[in-house]
Image: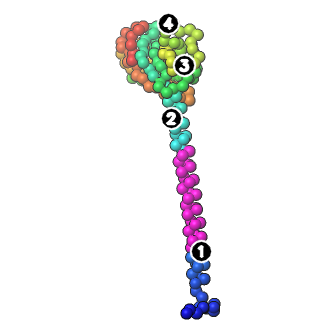
Amino acid sequence: MRSANDSQEQDTWGAIGIGAMIVFISLILVAAVASAVIIQTAEKLQQNAQNTGDQTSDELSGKLSVMQGYVDGGNDYVLYVRLAAGSSSILATTISWQLFCTAGVGYEDSAAAFTAANVQLQSVSAFGAGVGTMTVQNAYKIQIAANICDAAAVGGGEAQLYIHVERGGTTFETLSVPTGATTGTPVI
């Protein structure tokens, strides 16, 4: 037979139970804080990945691929381009360009002088009214009206061409212009 300990001095089971309960509650609180930190970190990583994906998509969704380039009118350049794979339609007025000439001849850019009239469907023989919106289905030609880095100035050398699409990508090409280049001379 068992005798019951009813005196407070001999009853230690209650003290052990309260200590275990305090340790258990503190473990739950620590786990809750740790899980909140992990969840917050995971959400921040997900947001950063989403932003990076959106920026990459924007970069690729408006980019030109240069197929061929020629001297036009003695000094200007005409580039035959298509929108790059995965691109969405772009406005012709959102295109700008920069030319860097060889051996310190100079630098120039479109300086907002590039208009829809400088973009035409490849199937149309002359530049005129141009096109407003470029789509993936069509091939286009772009007129680069250079003054400093024109074919006569670069003749026998190279010019680095950057074509920028606003809120889109940048295309880089090196134009190799032979000495005495005339209309129709390939530069790419």
Query: Which comes sooner in the sequence, label 3 or label 2?
Result: 2
Query: Which comes sooner in the sequence, label 1 or label 3?
Result: 1
Residue drawn at (44%, 8%), measured in percent from left and top?
74
Judged by depth in the image, the label closer to the viewer, 3 or 4, is 3
Q: Tell me the quarter of the image containing the C terminus.
A: top left
Residue drawn at (49%, 22%), measured in percent from left and top?
83
Residue 129: quarter of image: top right
Q: Which residue is mark 2?
A: 56
Give the amino acid type for the residue marked by disc 4 in the picture.
Ser
Q: Which residue is mark 1?
A: 22
Give the amino acid type for the residue marked by disc 3 in the picture.
Met
Query: Which comes sooner in the sequence, label 3 or label 4?
Result: 4
Q: Please, what is the dominant secondary structure of the magenta stretch?
A: helix
Give the amino acid type for the residue marked by disc 1 in the picture.
Ile
State if disc 3 and disc 1 touch (CB < 8 Å).
no
Please provide the residue range marked out in magenta. 21-47
Q: Which residue is mark 4?
A: 125
Image location (x, y in percent) of residue 39: 56, 54
* Distance in Å between CA atoms under marks 1 and 3: 69 Å
Q: Secondary structure at mark 2?
A: helix
User: Residue 134 has which mark?
Assistant: 3
Image location (x, y in percent) of residue 137: 50, 18
Query: Which comes sooner in the sequence, label 2 or label 1?
Result: 1
Relative to residue 102, is residue 83 drawn left or right? Answer: right
